[in-house]
Image (cartoon, grey):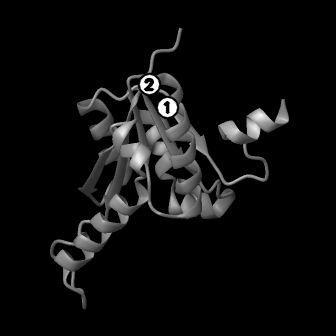
Amino acid sequence: MINLKNVLVAVNFDETSNVALRYARSLARNFGARLHVLHVMENLFLRPMANDPRAIEAGTTRRLLDTLTEEDRTVLHAVPVIRKSDAPAEEIVKYAQAEQIDLIVMGTHGRPGVAHLLMGSVAEKVVRTAPCPVLTLKQSEREFIVNDATEASAT
């Protein structure tokens, strides 16, 4: 039997992380698990910038909070988390270890060949070092999540 108490979704506000968030919500709901929503932002300390780093952090915090629905807050007891790091994969794994996460859900772009070598893959690093299973998702043509209304009308 699979027992999930804590599901972590790593988000970066792109379409693949939106897909990952939908899956994480569904899994947390189906297993009665708590949903942790983590965004790792670049460490802006000691970087020359035109914008105020505090304003950037405040905007990122607002954006993360805006991604959470009322159901996320009340039913899934969502935990919004922002961490600063230049090594996002390490930060995701560190959070998973500290919070006893049972499953990590995250999007991946699935870059091929040279693009993958040059840019690396946060998802791949998390898969290799995570203390728990990792579900990686890319934006696909077929959606596997169906809402209750759609399922009821199909039967």
Residue 48 in the image: above or below residue 20: below
Disc 2 crowd, CA 10 A, few/some/many (<14, 14-19, 20+): some
Vertical placement of residue 86 versus 36, above or below: below
Number of callouts in the render?
2
Give coordinates of residue 26: x percent, y percent. 55, 36
In the picture, measured across the screen, residue 150 lies left or right of residue 70, that is: right
Residue at (39, 36) in percent of width and height: 76
Q: Image quadrant for the C terminus?
A: top right
Tell me if residue 63 can be seen. yes
Q: Nearer the viewer, residue 110 or 102?
A: 102
Q: Residue visible at 32% across and 35% down?
A: 96
Residue receiving disc 1: 29
Q: Residue furthest right?
A: 155
| Circle 2/circle 1 CB separation < 8 Å | yes
Residue in the image at 53% along x and 26% along y = 30
Q: Amino acid at mark 2?
A: Gly
Q: Which element is circle 2 on?
A: loop
Front-most of residues 125 and 155: 155
Q: Which residue is mark 2?
A: 32
In the rendered view, does 91 fall on the left or right side of 144? left
Residue 44, position in %: x, y?
22, 72
Q: Position of residue 87 (x, y in %)?
A: 32, 55
Indicate left or right for 14 with 102 as reference: right
Amino acid type of disc 1? Arg
What residue lies at 58% left-to-right and 62% top-to-bottom? 15
As drawn, the residue found furthest toward the bottom would be 50
Q: Is residue 146 visible?
A: no
How dense is the environment of label 1, judged by Cα within 10 Å: few (below 14), some, or many (20 and up)?
A: some
Disc ID at residue 150: none
